[in-house]
Amino acid sequence: MTRFRSPSDLPPGDRTRLGHLLLALADNKRLLGIRYSDWILGAPSVEAGIACSAMSQDEWGHGRIVYSMLKDFDHDPRQLEFLREADGYLNSEVVDSEAPTWPDLIALNLLWDTALSVQFDVLAEGSYEPLHHKSRKLLQEERYHFDHAVGWSERLMTGSGGEAALAGACGAIWNSCIRWFGESDDPLISPLADLGLVPRPRVTRARWLARVGPVAGLLGLAVESGEVESDEEGQWVGAPELHWEGWSASRRRRQDGGPDEDSLARVRGDRNRVLVADA
């Protein structure tokens, strides 16, 4: 497999595609950090609030690292971080607005945070070498996020009404998460897979399903969604037919929408950025 040591080693079209994928990851990291921060003071316990604070800082740090990498892909990091409107963001609809309940946040923690981690996981194994070290360091911090999600999922499943609430929250974002990895002929991912930068969408999706499947199965999502199944060895795999109505491969999300007004102002730092001379 050919190894690529810098963006200039990549064919122009694939350099643009990889930059686009990295921008989608950075935007999702930034918005997920906002979603965790929403619950710093509203979590069920002081310890849970502290965990939200730590995970929020992790996500913002990860996003900042990826934004800074994009200058090598002909992007202006300052413009990306501070000057875009909502329809210019490539984040999933699952982080457009605040998670309304604690089970909704844990669903994001379990399913969406893990989807992003799996995408970095495969990038760390791919043929673009500058991502190897950065992804592995990032993934070390993400292990705690998954442990937090599993721990709280188990806790909610033992409480009164918690299991139903978490199942509903996971079900609401399930299709958005499973679509993130793209269709079999995804115009962004498939050319990158040809170069060994990432695997085929079904391979990455299967890795995500293997990670979240045990918890999802306890919640009954395997039956209710109709979008996952177990193979002969009990491994979670993607079912042949997924729902792609309204999916935008270029925005990596549902076609319409973007971060809500409050989230956009916070993610750009609109309120106080004017006070900083070099912002």
Image (spheres, rainbow, N blue to C red):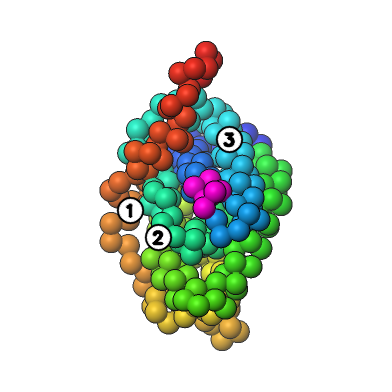
Magenta stretch, main secondary structure, is loop
The circle drawn on residue 176 is: 2
Task: Tell me the SS state at disc 1.
Answer: strand
Q: Residues within 10 Å of mark 1 (few under 14, many from 20)?
A: many
Question: Foreground residue, 186 or 56?
Answer: 56
The circle drawn on residue 64 is: 3
Q: Residues within 10 Å of mark 3 (few under 14, many from 20)?
A: some
Look at the picture and state if 271 lies above or below 219. Answer: above
Q: Which residue is mark 1?
A: 254
Question: Foreground residue, 93 or 2?
Answer: 93
Q: Is residue 55 visible?
A: no
N-terminal label among 2 and 3: 3
Q: Tag 1: residue type?
A: Arg
Magenta residues, start to end: 36-42
- Label 1 close to label 2 by CB (< 8 Å): yes
Marks 3/1: CA–CA distance: 24 Å
